[in-house]
Amino acid sequence: MTIVDILLLALLLGCVGAVAYPFALYPVVLTLLPRRCVTSLQADARSASLLFCAYNEGAAMPGKIANLAMLKTRHPDLQVLAFDDRSNDDTAQLLDARSDLLTLVSSEGRSGKAHGMKQLAALATGDVLIFTDANVALAPDAIDNLLAYYADPQVGGVLGSLQYEGGEGSATAAVGSLYWRIEEALKDRESATGNVMGADGSIFSIQRELYPDFPDTVLDDLTVSMAVVFAGKRLIKAKDVIAIEGLVSARGDEYRRKVRIAARAWHTHRYLRPALRRMARVDRFKYTSRKIVRWFGGVFIATGALAALALLWRLWPDALPFAVVGSAILALIGWRVRSGPIASVVDILLAYVATLQGIVRAMRGQVVATWSPAKSRQDG
């Protein structure tokens, strides 16, 4: 092999390593970090407010309302606040009909989740703000278990554990389920070593006095949860605080969702950058490993593929056309089918493409504030 061949091979291996790092090496590194246990776990007398935003979630509302009724039976003093982002289905009517369970705030026009959550947070009276999604159901003991962690004075925020259901037979749902199991395991390990690097909207909570001010264009889940870390408190994850959500089973729905989330994530990253730089070194390492490296996975995959083709052309030029044609055929098969290993590989690659597309859009100045629920999501 020539020096050029060696450099191409090194580039290929480096790209493979960069793609695998957040899922393979990073978890190993986390196991080597010092453990930080929760110092006390007991019944806590703090009051709580449960907040969620909805847009065209009429199909999910019967299950959501039943779940809220169950939670209110266990916690009669629980304040439940809902924001309807000008739905054009019966979401607002269904919520408004249950004024015995919740207080509904209706938007005059589409304003987005971040704006809605800020409206609800301003009305909340609980010591602890619990954030969830309109399509998520909480386990009966979720609030009891969540509040118990606040007995530790160092804890400023608690994430729950999300369990997905539904989507049987869909490669998109299977890939999403696998990705989320890996994500949950990473959060568990981050929590055991200090702080989790941000929450998603399914289930998390913070002390009310830590709720920050922020623009409507950022990811409120990431911004609000990271405010706990910036304040010097611990952001931990609780395995016994369970939330359940339906999987997205259609490839197009999942692709659009990932583009939107990635665009807002990068915009949020830029907004939080000054505070991120002031974090402890271990938290900066965690944030870079779990977020930034993964966001640019599409670049590593594309660069690695080009390096592989270039190396193949230099070493076995006659095999290059077969490799290109074979890859194209496999990609076409994976695109046309919706289940099986080839379809799963295509869905994984599409996830990286969607994430990179969202990042590029954000870098170009595109801002996404509103959202729409996935039509293929299976609601309980």
Image: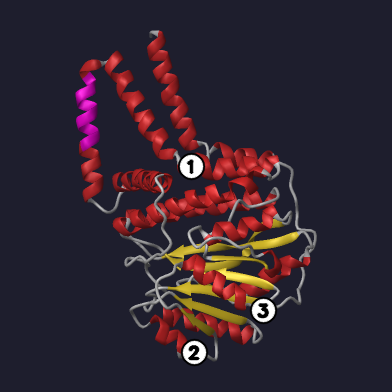
* Viewer-side label of 3, 2: 3
Name which residue type carries label 3. Thr
Image coordinates for residue 46, horizontal then vertical, percent = 74, 75
Q: CA distance from mark 3 to mark 2?
A: 20 Å
Q: In the rendered structure, which disc, 1 or 2, sits on the residue that comes first in sequence?
A: 2
Q: Dot 2: within a 10 Å radius of its alpha carbon, few (fewer than 14), some, or many (20 or more) residues? A: few
Q: Residue furthest top?
A: 2
Image coordinates for residue 335, horizontal then vertical, percent = 24, 47
Q: Quadrant of residue 34?
A: top right
Q: Quadrant of the C terminus?
A: bottom left
Q: Considering the whole magenta stretch, tell me its main secondary structure.
A: helix
> In the displayed structure, does residue 3 sit left or right of residue 195?
left
Circle number at residue 125: 3
Residue at figure coordinates x 36%, y 33% from the top left: 302
Nearer-the-camera pick, 295 or 164: 295
Circle number at residue 66: none
Question: Helix, strand, or loop for circle 1?
Answer: helix
**Which residue is under mark 1?**
294
Q: Which residues are magenta?
A: 319-328
Nearer-the-camera pick, 128 or 61: 128
Circle number at residue 98: 2
